[in-house]
Image (cartoon, helix red, strand yellow):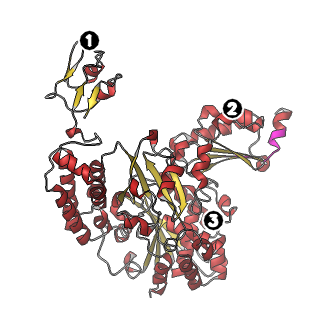
Amino acid sequence: MNSETRKNVEKQLRVSVCMGTGGMAAGGADVLETFKKEIANAGIDAEVGRRCDIHKVGCRGFCAKDVLVDVFIDGEKTTYERVSPDMVPRIVNEHIIGGSPVAEIAVKEDYSTFNAKQIKVVLSDCGVIDPEDIDAYIGRGGYGAVKKVLLQMTPLETIDIIKASGLRGRGGAGFPTGIKWEFGYKAQDSQKYIVCNADEGDPGAFMDRSVVEGNPHLIIEAMIIAAYAIGASVGYVYIRAEYPLAVKRLNLALEEAKGRGYLGDNIIGSSFSFNIKVKLGAGAFVCGEETALIASIEGKRGMPRSKPPFPAQKGLFGKPTIINNVETLANIPYIINRGAEWFASLGTLKSKGTKVFALTGKIKNTGLIEVPMGIKLRDIIFEIGGGIEYDKAFKAVQTGGPSGGCITADNLDINVDYESLAAVGSIMGSGGMVVMDEDDCMVNIAKYFLEFTQSESCGKCTPCRIGTKRLLEILTRITEGKGKSTDIKLLEELSRDIIATSLCGLGQTAPNPVLSTIRYFRHEYEAHIHDKRCPAKVCKALLTFTINESTCTGCTACARNCPVGAITGVKKTPHRIMQEKCIKCGSCFDACKFHSVIKE
């Protein structure tokens, strides 16, 4: 090691590489290993005195910029975006050794804009600590809330602080968490259970998965507190098997917690004992509903049952059970440590705190965000999200997943909270937020979400089993150009019947995308049905492809790419599409460099 390298090594050095699912998909593991190799090759000892700490972190949030890498030298941070293994030698040589950050691959102004209006509570340690190192969590105050509760507070005092905070369930319904815990506390039984619902299955949603991947000890700590509050001795984390990274890190964290005395008998020398088990779900969306989830843990088919009795009275194995989703629980340690008043100061009068959203779709800055309740929807989409991809026109945003509704440009200035979203025909849900642009067909969007909910229906109740199937059949018929004049009215009536008579939340909310798209985009339904035309030019059965002979150069690209030989013409003369043979695949449209193929 030369003197210049040694001089820089004497500074405290830390490198953090995003290794959530998104970061790993972008090549985070290779980037991490390349950093280790390059620093070793440079003669920098990564172990002695821990002067150089190279570690993984969970999701950093700005997924559009993965792989994100933080380089800390004596506490001064430089963040690099879209890092690939071939960029690492330059970062090591110019920045870590040479002391000059590599400006052209450092994050740009949009990174600051992405974070400017966020307030991170649940995500405050995600992307900061190594999720596979309990000491990293403890170093940020982890398990301090457990010590405070078990050694200084009674169960009722614990419940009272959660009630005073105004925390509401983040799984969709928004029920007050403290009141739910109080129900569990008052239930008379020698055996009670706490269940963490990590069965996140909404299309485009990855909030809970990212929290478990990035900070699993936070969920364990919260479950200990919840169990103490209601008097439970056993907890379950119900998590889908399709989240292998989250499952791996959760199991590792459970072993670490047991080894440090945070799980098991007489936790940290108290009289309280508690253990957590992991139950893998098979990917059934309906198991996000609490009674179906309970049935699945019990080894039965995941199907909901009617309520009452509610799980707080008669839940898992017939015993009182409190179920909270990942994000709800993730707020608990912070509330205990910082106080109810602090949490209640965030958000709105009825919707306290922050909310985590998975921002996806036709948006420039896709990623995981956490914002204060009451923020304007416009601020999320056009400031944090950076606006619509390719600068196209905003059309709608679907909140609440397949059970939510579409919100249009007319409502972009609403506050994002439980009541405001409900007022415009949508829901908060667990936090999925899918943005759509001018090229999206809203009839097709409704059909897409119905395909999902219909296939995920457990089939137990007739309104959901048959009703969603009928809705999907009607929507399919409309997108195929076979719609009837009575279809819109039929969709509305059938949707309301399904909502009113379905057994569980899946059926009761499945028609929401249909009703909201009819409410705001009735003209698109009418165009499909009456004019046999798709305004967004998405539904293939309603498209017609023709060639503008005045601009066609006869290059033959369209004919060469047509899979059914529907295009005639000789080279350097205008071509023509035989409509009787055309299968409307769009290959000719994509192949034409002169924009002579017209899609109508």
Q: Amino acid at mark 2?
A: Arg
Query: Is residue 112 rendered to the left or right of residue 231?
Result: right
Res. 11 image quadrant:
top right
Going 84% across and 39% down the picture, which residue do you hit? 7
Look at the picture and state if 34 lies above or below 162.
above
Between disc 3 and disc 1, the foreground one is 1
Res. 303 image quadrant:
bottom left
Residue segment shown in magenta = 7-15
Quadrant location of the C terminus in the rendered image: top left
Q: Position of residue 8 (x, y in %)?
A: 81, 40
Give how far apart the Cα atoms at labels 1 and 2 are: 51 Å
Q: Which mark is residue 90?
A: 2
Going 68% across and 32% down the picture, which residue do you hit? 89
Q: Position of residue 14 (x, y in %)?
A: 72, 47
- Residue identifier under label 1: 571
Look at the picture and state if 527 lies above or below 144.
above
Nearest the viewer among 232 and 512 is: 512
Q: Amino acid at mark 1?
A: Lys
Quadrant location of the N terminus in the rendered image: top right
Between disc 1 and disc 2, the foreground one is 1
Query: Is residue 284 rendered to the left or right of residue 57?
Result: left
Q: Position of residue 37 (x, y in %)?
A: 67, 36
Element on which disc 3 rests: helix
Going 20% across and 32% down the picture, which residue do you hit? 583
Q: Amino acid at mark 3?
A: Gly
The reply to whether dot 2 and dot 3 touch (C-beta < 8 Å) is: no
- Check residue 8 for magenta coloring: yes
Nearest the viewer among 341 and 63 is: 341
- Residue identifier under label 3: 259
Give how far apart the Cα atoms at labels 2 and 3 are: 41 Å
Q: Position of residue 170 (x, y in %)?
A: 47, 67
Can residue 464 be seen in this snapshot?
Answer: yes
